[in-house]
Image (cartoon, rainbow, N blue to C red):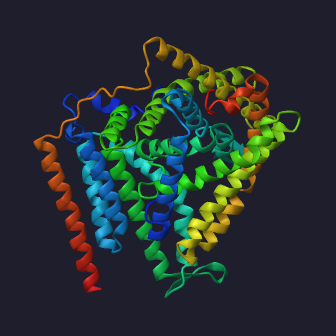
Amino acid sequence: MHIVDGALSNPVVIAGAVAAAGGIALGLRSLTMEKIPVAGVLSATFFVASLIHVPIGPSSVHLILNGLAGLILGWAAFPALFVGLVLQAVFFGFGGVTVLGINTFNIAMPAVLAGLICGPLLRRGGARAALWGGIGGALAIALTTLFVAVSLALSGTQFGVAAQLVFVAHLPVMLVEGLLTAAAVSLALKVRPDLFTALEPTP
Amino acid sequence: MGHLLLEPDHHGADTGTPAPIRRLDPRARLLAALAFAITTVALQTLPALALALAFALALLALSGLPARITLRRMAMMDGFILFMLLLLPVTTPGTPLATLPFGVVATVEGLRLAVEIGLTANAVILALMVLVGTMDPVTLGHALARLKTPLLLVHLLLFTVRYVDVLRAEYLRARQAMRARAFRPGSNRHTWRSLGHLVGMLLVRALERSERILQAMKCRGFTGQFPLMDRLAFTPRDRVFAVACAAGLGALGIVEVTVAHLA
């Protein structure tokens, strides 16, 4: 899902960078130095989780879990996922430099939206909580794929086919991420329900 | 296998004197990578882009990074975008180049665009891995802080870097425990649920670990400020590097303008 340098038109790249900077600023405003350890360790966990490969049919995909990140981190998902993308670009060579902004936005904005929509329903607990977690996980992937497709389509009509293929190819990923997030949420709610409020300001 | 992010540095450490690029100020390397990326993305002529890729390869030779591993990483990225690049010749309207089976027409413009994106993406990512990827991740954080990146973001990066290896070890241990209980991943709900529980458990343990970290920090007098312990110095060597970079980027611009003028 990483877009590389040179593939997008300048307006898309610049708009993405501006939007990502805004999201990161909002995310940082929700953090204090006291919250840095918990945000940092969770961000490292999501980085490690993105290295997990899950078989789908004859092929396999790596997890993104941005929905789960949004459910737990809220707006702090922006800086956390940005850090992950920076590390991946610098040390693994995935993605690019000028596209860091748009890539961050495409992954973190759906995370935040999933967190805003499904988070309150999940925190109510009960039998439906895992279901809302799963919906959040699938929704975030659906939105990310949509955002990537739109970024490509806005950069030129010749990318239209690629954009549609990206969307179709990610339908099974959506399902897998949804089921996985639901399982993760149901376990976390049983063991440490405060995981989903860990980044809220301490009274 | 242990060190996920520290790997490149460990290769270079064995060779005695550090490679030329590693002796430069991290800030200079960071800014050079950024300037190179912005310039290269702005280029549109193929000779200028080829020259940019040649510059990145020259930097690789000066970096002390193992060339084969680095180029293989770069090729892995190409694997991801190959599909899109292969589609471009047939989805871009323009002068027909060849007719493929099923009446699909590949165009000159599409092929050119695919080559352009391929060259840009490879040159930029290679320069980034060579200039910045050769840094210790902690140094990268400190360099970013010295370049006025918000401190909260820098510390988030430093904490992430610090705990990626710890959590990866925890993940691998859990996977080994699953394997010992005859877990074999497949395309079924059991696999997805088990891996979901694994992720949930990792997150719970991460939360508990972060609480212990904060307590340990407070015990040692954490007052809401992290000191940044480093000594970055912009030396004459960095000045030479900066001038060389400016000259190189200028040369790219001249090639671009000349070629565009001739066409």
Q: Is residue B156 above or below residue A2?
A: above
Quadrant housing the C terminus of chain A: top right
As drawn, the residue found furthest toward the bottom would be B95
User: In the visual, does B230 lie left or right of B72?
Assistant: left
Q: Is residue A51 above or below residue A15?
A: above
Quadrant housing the N terminus of chain A: bottom right
User: Is residue B184 in view from this perspective?
Assistant: no
- Residue drawn at (54%, 75%) of the image: A156
Q: How many marks?
A: 0
Q: Please tell me which residue lies in front, A46 or B174.
A: A46
Q: Position of residue A98 (x, y in %)?
A: 42, 58
- Residue drawn at (33%, 34%) of the image: B139
Q: Please tell me which residue lies in front, B70 or B220.
A: B220
User: In the visual, does A114 lie left or right of A34?
Assistant: right
Q: Position of residue B173 (x, y in %)?
A: 62, 21
Q: Please tell me which residue lies in front, B114 or A103.
A: A103
Q: Position of residue A161 (x, y in %)?
A: 63, 72
Q: Is residue B115 above or below residue B166?
A: below
- Residue drawn at (54%, 79%) of the image: B92
User: In the visual, does B204 lie left or right of B214?
Assistant: right
Q: Position of residue B37 (x, y in %)?
A: 35, 58
Quadrant of residue A5 in the image?
Answer: bottom left
Quadrant of residue A86 in the image?
Answer: top left
